[in-house]
Amino acid sequence: MPIVPATHAPRPPALRAVACATALLASACQDELAVTDTEASATTGTSGTTTTSEPGTTTGEPPTTGEPPTTGSDGDTTGEPPPSCEALPGAPPPVEVADVRVVPIDVVKVAAELRFDPAAQEVLGRATLEFRSGPLRGLPTFDLRQSIDRAVLDGVELPAGAIVPFMPPSQTTMLVVNRMLEPCGEHRLELEYHVEAAFEADPRPFVWAGDTVGWGTHLADYFGGRFSEKWVPANLIYDVHALELEIVVDSDTPHEVVANAPVTALADDRWAVNFPAITSMDPLVQLCPTASVMREALDVGAIEALVWHCTLWPGATDEASAVADALAPALQFAADELGPYPHGDRFLAVVAPPGEAAMEYPGGTVTTWAAVSHEVFHSWIGRSARPLGQRDAWFDESWTTWAIEEAFEADPLALEAPPFTLATDNLWSRDTPLESYKLGPSLLTTLANEVGLPELRAHLREFFAANTGQAVTTEQFERSLECRFEGGPVRALFHRFVYGQEGDPPQPPPGYCDSP
């Protein structure tokens, strides 16, 4: 996503008084959220059972402090959860709030329906969140930026107030279910909700015109809460899961849906979009009346590219031709720089509605003509070799900006410049530092000046090839550079300008470059 001015807006309250929205389990809320073991066992279902320890594992629940886990020099978190239900790589640590533990989950599948009623100018959402609880007992957390009307957990209807906003160690709230779940269980959360604009600062998400409607997922990554949780229940970006989305329009006027995934027409104005394995930052879905759609199909080598434009938005201009003209060169440049296109044989370019920032998706983009090259490059760096967590998202913006906007020639860093943190050690973080677009490219230029630009670009191609379709941590990125250019400035640059530390970096541990 290219840098544009953005504002941060709070989430709407969900099923809860505002008094409890900023501090879960504050004294005003504590009585409601204190769940007894008997109550917990009645709501966790038969699958929410405690596992017995296996030989070589630690029994019991280790104390948690709410602090992020320490990481080793290779980026692995310290400590080993029980092997029977290990925490996912990149999952944040549990948080203790008023003596109650809030725990991350492993989402298996989200099945959701969004029903648009143009006559009432209303959107209703229904979703089922299938998830696994992790190795520790606690209250499960997820996110949805909408007001929930009804919730059912494992077949038991939850009362109003059972799902409340929760403030983890970040600047963005999530939701927590006030039911104590045992470790290693499988659960099903059913939700019904009204769908409105997720953030007041966002451009209008819907356009109503008579018996027609225009809509798009319109995700964004500057601030937390702007991925698929805007529309359907979701998790942080470490979690890969299936998403089955149905779009329904209650109208006699034909509409069209496009997505960066297969779209199946189930009936008139009813579609299914199937994402077999995605993160919350991936789904690109657009809805528009058929009469308002402009499209242009392109063959770019082996890639079938579609430029798609919904003119229903007020003030919409015809940028489709300009986007189409820029698309083939952008795809060719990325392939020449990094290797073959990593998303099959389709690419979807949606012309951004007025006021909407450009955004990258796997095998697609919502874009202005000026941002085409940037967003296309992200289909390689950012949505193929992708950040494991939001704290790692600086590297794909830095790399993309360095290659596209800076043409590999950003201003180098002054090594005595003040330290800056691009990669926080907080795994709950959901923001992309805006300095990723300036300081990050300068870091890469500084490194290129030391090791040679052709050598650095060649190594980055190798790094992409080794991590195509994989999640990448900051520490893995650092290690690949350090071990390729051993004795160079990599460790010092990361120590000061990525981790924000003063002084000299510590020496790599023994065997640092022996691991793959």
Image: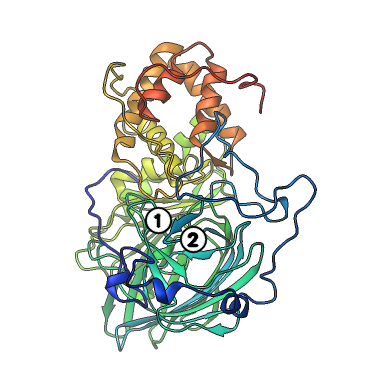
Q: Secondary structure at mark 2?
A: strand
Q: Is residue 406 left or right of residue 391?
A: left
Confirm or deny contact between disc 2 and disc 1 (CB under 8 A): yes
Q: Return the residue found at the far left.
A: 315
Q: Which residue is mark 1?
A: 168
Name the amino acid type tagged 2: Val
Name the amino acid type tagged 1: Pro
Q: Secondary structure at mark 1?
A: loop
Q: Position of residue 346 (x, y in %)?
A: 53, 53
- How far is disc 2 from disc 1 in space, using C-alphas? 9 Å
Decide: few, some or many residues near mark 2? Use Cα within 10 Å; few <14, some 14-19, many ≥20: many
Q: Which residue is mark 2?
A: 102
Quarter of the C terminus within the rendering: top right
* Residue occupying the point 72% across, 55% down: 84
Choose between 126 and 514: the one closer to the eye.
514
Choose between 103 and 380: the one closer to the eye.
103
